[in-house]
Amino acid sequence: MNMELSHTQTYLRSMTLLREEVPSFKKYPFHLPAVAQFERLDFHPKVTYIVGENGMGKSTLLEAFAVALGFNPEGGTLNMTFSTAETHSELHQYLRPIRGVYKPRDGFFFRAESYYNLATEIDRLDNEPSFFPLPNIIESYGGKSLHTMSHGESFFAAFMNRFGGKGLYIMDEPEAALSPFRQMAMLSRIHELVNKQSQFIISTHSPILMAYPDSVIYQLTPEGIQKVELEETDHYVIMKEFVNHRERMLGELLEG
């Protein structure tokens, strides 16, 4: 999908699939509709959302984008090199990122499903002996081991403390452990960081997180990738229908 978007602080302008180099579109992950129809995706200079039903390939795409940019498949900063399990696809090998004029000073790949592994690696690195008095990594996450917090608290600690601005932040389902209130707080934090010249690429199921006004939403469907408005996403439509017509929908869901 081609869409011209420009901004002086855009760090990642687009991602192109080198289709002529793909060995086969009949095997994973190239057989997924979102990948099979993929040519180029243009990123909003502030916030880009990738949404869709389970199994459409959101995490696969986001992971490939992150790895193509040099991030660890399991998440973290560009300096994180740990590996718990080699489960990422080869899609990143066939992607070509088009970067902006400016280079981000900060960057992070936040991945909900492997956040525990990241927290464990931070504790391990901080406990390693060192010949030089260096500050613990955990200080940049709020100073408290992420394993000593609830799942939601540890997620939020990263958003509030580790993300500092002038950064490129790729986030895969960050709402996974957040209450609706925390999701709204996160939306506010995203706005703060956008105002500090940051760019976000977010995969999410949350209509709350999708609501940032200065953004673009790409919905993954069996037909490929479509640019949509918030009100056109399945997530928004279903949630609105359920809230406004709860009794009727419950009757349909639970009858029999």
Image (cartoon, rainbow, N blue to C red):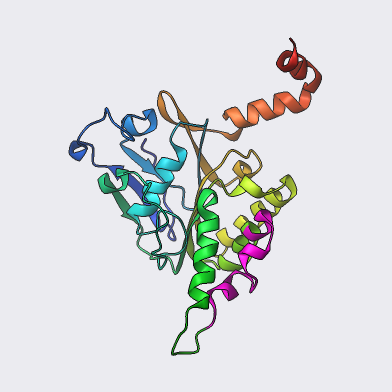
Asked where in the image residue 225 lies, by quadrant, the reply is top left
Q: Position of residue 108 (x, y in %)?
A: 48, 61
Q: Is residue 88 left or right of residue 189?
A: left
Q: Position of residue 197 (x, y in %)?
A: 51, 63
- Foreground of the two, 5 or 18: 18
Say if residue 46 shows up in the picture: no
Q: In the displayed image of the protein, which residue is found farthest to the right? A: 247
Relative vertical location of residue 228 with respect to residue 89 in this rendering, above or below: above
Say if residue 142 shows up in the picture: yes
Relative vertical location of residue 122 with respect to residue 150 in this rendering, above or below: below
Indicate yes or no whether the magenta region holds residue 13. no
Asked where in the image residue 237 lies, by quadrant, the reply is top right
The N terminus sits in image quarter: top left
The C terminus sits in image quarter: top right
- Foreground of the two, 54 or 15: 54
Relative vertical location of residue 240 with respect to residue 96 in this rendering, above or below: above
**x 69%, y 29%: residue:** 239
Q: Position of residue 132 (x, y in %)?
A: 45, 90
Q: Position of residue 143 (x, y in %)?
A: 63, 74
Highlighted magenta segment, given as a residue range: 135-154
Q: Is residue 186 left or right of residue 22?
A: right
**x 48%, y 63%: residue:** 167
Indicate yes or no whether the magenta region holds residue 142. yes
Q: In the displayed image of the protein, which residue is found farthest to the top? A: 256
- Foreground of the two, 113 or 142: 113
Main secondary structure type of the part rendered in magenta: helix
Q: Is residue 127 left or right of residue 8?
A: right
